[in-house]
Image (spheres, coloured by chain):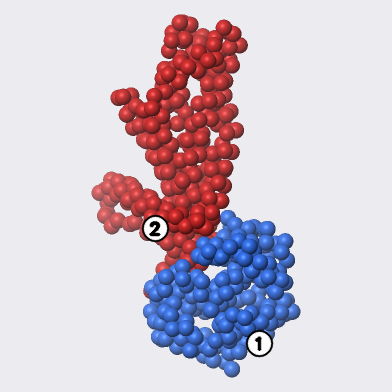
Chain colours: A blue, B red
Amino acid sequence: MPLLVKNLNIEYPGKVLFKDLQVEIEDQKIVAVRTEVLDGGTTLLKGLAGMLDGIDGEVRLDGIDLLHMDPAQRALKVGYVYEQQGLVSLYDCFQNIALPLQFHTTTGNELVESRIFSLCEKFNVDRQILNEYPHALNDVQCRMINLLRALVIEPKLLLIDELEGGMSERVLGDTIDTLREEQKNNAMIVIITTADDLLLDQADYSYQIENNKLRECH
Amino acid sequence: MLDQQSDNLKIPEETLSWSGTGKAILNPFANFYHVSMEIIGLISVALKASTLLLNKRRRQLFYALFQRQVYNAGVSALYVNGVIGFLIGTLLISRLFDYLPRQIIEDQFGQIFMVVVFRELGPLISGIILIARSATAITSEIGYLRLQREFQVLNGLGINPVFLFLLPVFFAFPVSLFLMFIYFDVIVFLSSFAVVWISDPSISFTGLLANILSQITLNEIAINAVKAILGGMLIGIISIYFGAKVVDSFTEVTESISKATTAQLLVFFIINVLLSLLAYTQ
C-alpha cells in the first residue's frame, strides 16, 4: 500500500487531536478529509508530512518512514499546500516555486523554468504573477503558487490544506481535473482537507474527523 | 507532544525560580548569561550552516540574499555616512586648524586623524548607523517572518531557515560595516581638506594624505577589521536572535527591536573600547 498510517497519535498540551489513527491509501487516489474549524485537519496534514516533531506512530510512503526521514529527502517526496500564506516573502513567486528544486537538486535553470511555465499553463496561472512578491497576491493566487511549488518537485504525496477558499466552483473543478491529469504522469496520492461538498464529491474517498480518528464517509 | 510552534530557531524562554531580593539582584545577571550563551549557540549554528555554501546551487541562492543585505546595509548607507562624515570633517577636524599652530598641524595631522577619526569616530559612528538603520530593519523583518510562520514553511521544504534568514546577515553585516568605515574615513578626510584648503590654499593634498597614511599601520588596519568583523557579526546575530523571539503578536516585534538595539549598542561600544585599548597599548 503506497501510504500507510499506523497508530498515529498527535496531541498538543492538554488536547488530543488524533489517537491510534489508521489509514491506508492506494496510489493515484484523491482523498478528501472533511474539516471544521480547529478540528485538527491542518495538524493532520502536517503530521502526515513529517513536519511536526514529537508525534508517535508510523507514516509510510512506499514503505519509507516519513516521520524519521531526512527532511531534505522528504521535501522531494511530499508536497504541501498551505491554506494561507506559506510562501517566502523574500522571494518572488517564480523563486518561491523554484526554491525546492534549486536547493535540493541539480536540475538546470532551464529545466526548472520550463517545468514552472508548464505547470502555470496546466493550472491556468497567469505567468505575470510569477514576478510578483507574495504580499501582492490574493488568497487564491497565493494558494495556487503554493500548489505549483508543491507540484514542481513531482511529489509522491501531495497534501492540500483547504484549496477551495475564495475559488469559484469552475476553478476548483478545473484544478481537481488537472490534478487528476497530473496523477497520470506522476503516480501521486493527493489528500485534501476541505469543507466543500464539490471536493468531497469529486474525491475517490472522503473521510471525516470524528473522535480523534478518521471515519470514511463514502 | 507538540510544541505550539516548532522550527529550527526555537529559543526557549529562560525562567529562573528564585524569589525575593535574590531574584531581583541575580536575575538580570542570569538573564544576561543565558542570552549570551544562546547568542554564542546561534553563532555556532551559523558557522555549521555555512558548510551548506560548499554546494554551488545553494551558494547562488545565498549570494542573491547576501548581495541584497550588503546593498541595503552597506551601499545604501553611503548617503547617511557621507553626510555625517562631511559634517565631522568640515566642522570638527577643520576647526583644529584654527586652534593649533600650523607647524603642529602639518606634523601631527596624520596622527590626530588616525586616532580621532580612523580609530575612534569612524568605527563608532558607522556601527551606530548600522544599528540604527539596518539592524532594526533586520530584527523587524525576522519578527515578521516568524509571525508569518515562514520559518516553518522553510522547515517543511527541508530547508534550514538559518541558511536563508541568518547566514546572509551574518556575512553581510561585517562587510557592510567595513565599507562604512571606508566611506566615513574618506569623506571626513576630503571634507576637512576642502575646508582647510579654502582658508589656506598652500596646504598640500598629497602632503596631508601621506601624513595620514604614514600613521595607519598594519596593526591599525587589523584592529579596524576586527571591529568590523566582530561588531558586524554580533550586531547581525543579535538582530536575528531577538527577531526570532517573536512568536504570536506584532507587539513582540517592537519589543524585540528595543531589546536588540539596546544589546547591540552595549556590545558594539564594549568591542570598540576594548579594541581601541588594545590599539593604544601597541
Q: Amino acid at mark 2?
A: Ile
The C terminus of chain B, quarter of image: top left
- Residue carrying label 1: A202
Crowd tier of the residue under label 2, counting other residues whose Cα lies within 10 Å: few below 14, some 14–19, many 20 or above: some
Nearer-the-camera pick, A30 or A121: A121
The N terminus of chain B, quarter of image: bottom left
Q: Quadrant of residue B115?
A: top left
Point 44% across, 55% down: residue: B54
Q: Chain of mark 2?
A: B
Q: Chain of mark 1?
A: A
Q: Quadrant of residue A99?
A: bottom right
Most extreme residue toward the bottom is A218
- Residue carrying label 2: B11
Quick one: SS at disc 2?
loop
Q: CA distance from mark 2 to mark 1?
A: 44 Å
Q: Is residue A114 left or right of residue B112?
A: right
Point 70% across, 62% down: residue: A129
Point 60% across, 76% down: residue: A162
Q: Amino acid at mark 1?
A: Gln
Q: Is residue A119 left or right of residue A206?
A: right
Q: Is residue B197 above or below residue B20?
A: above
Tags 2 and 1 in contact by the CB under 8 Å rule?
A: no
Point 51% across, 9% down: residue: B98
Residue A212 - label: none
Q: Position of residue A169 (x, y in %)?
A: 72, 80
Q: Position of residue A133 (x, y in %)?
A: 64, 57
